[in-house]
Image (cartoon, rainbow, N blue to C red):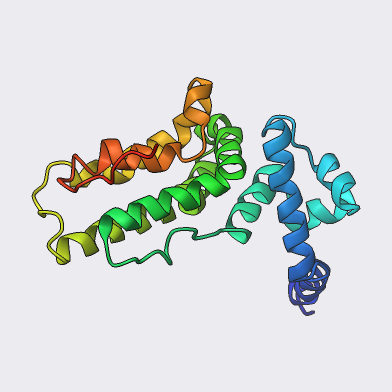
Amino acid sequence: MASPGPVQEPALSSRRSKITPERAQELYTAVLDLLRESGYASLTMEGVAARTRCGKSTLYRQWGSKPELVVAALHGTRRTLLTDIDTGSLSADLRAAMAVVEAASDRDTALMHALSHAAMQSPELLCAMRETLIAPSIAAIETMIRRGIERGEVAADNPAVPYVAAQLIGIMRARPLLPDRYATEGFLTRFVECAVLPALGLPAPPSGP
């Protein structure tokens, strides 16, 4: 008698394929929006189902649990905001990167803060957060610095080089916790100009009026 396994597996695949890629993106977007609004602890499969008008049973059948859905949402909406920046100048690259980050900071920083505590208790979630929110930015910044070294703008043995990415990621994450005066438009760009470029031995542009 044939094993029921091969018969059941296509049926499961059929059930899982009912969610189209476009519909999955809608669900992922809703998950991340709810995380930004209320945090990880308050996120529920019921809340996602209500926000997206999707059956709760469909969510569980497709992803199994809240952590799995959040991990899928992080990977499914992964963006690389900084990888296309290449101005031909390291100082201009770093200023452009901070301008891009500043434009997206309300959404991205809120998401990182919403996930930070939960990620410390979930290795899978922590890995997804690092892979989708942190590692791409670090890689992009390190690529900018490598190009600057290759162009001769910065010495390869400059002691500040290994710390630039961590410095920028740190200030992006810390900024919402700082006093209001740090929330002014252009703060991240000025941070690069006044704190990062001098450490790399690069001239900062003159202060604005």
In the image, residue 95 sits, relative to residue 79, either above or below, namely above
Residue for point 42% across, 40% down: 188
Q: Can residue 83 be seen in this view?
A: yes
Residue 168 point in image, percent of width and height: 36, 41
Horizontal and vertical percent position of residue 58: 85, 56
Q: Could you tell me how many numbered marks the image carries? A: 0
Of 21 and 86, nearer the camera is 86
Identify the residue at horizontal 42%, vertical 48% (top origin): 98
> Which quadrant would the N terminus be assigned to in this image?
bottom right
Residue at position x 68%, y 46% from top?
32
Quadrant showing the C terminus: top left
The residue positioned farthest toward the front in the image shown:
209
- Find residue 207 and report its horizontal and vertical position in percent: 33, 38
Q: Residue at x 24, y 41 (%)?
A: 163
Q: In this view, does 154 lie to the left or right of 53?
A: left
Judged left or right of residue 59, residue 179 is: left
Nearer-the-camera pick, 60 or 3: 60
The answer to whether residue 135 is seen in the rendering is no
List x then y, in percent, for residue 85.
40, 64
- Image quadrant in which you'd find residue 199: top left
Identify which residue, 61 or 84, lies in the foreground. 84
Q: 103 and 167: which one is in front?
A: 103
Residue 82 sits above or below residue 31 on the image? below
Seen as rendered, the residue at the extreme top is: 179
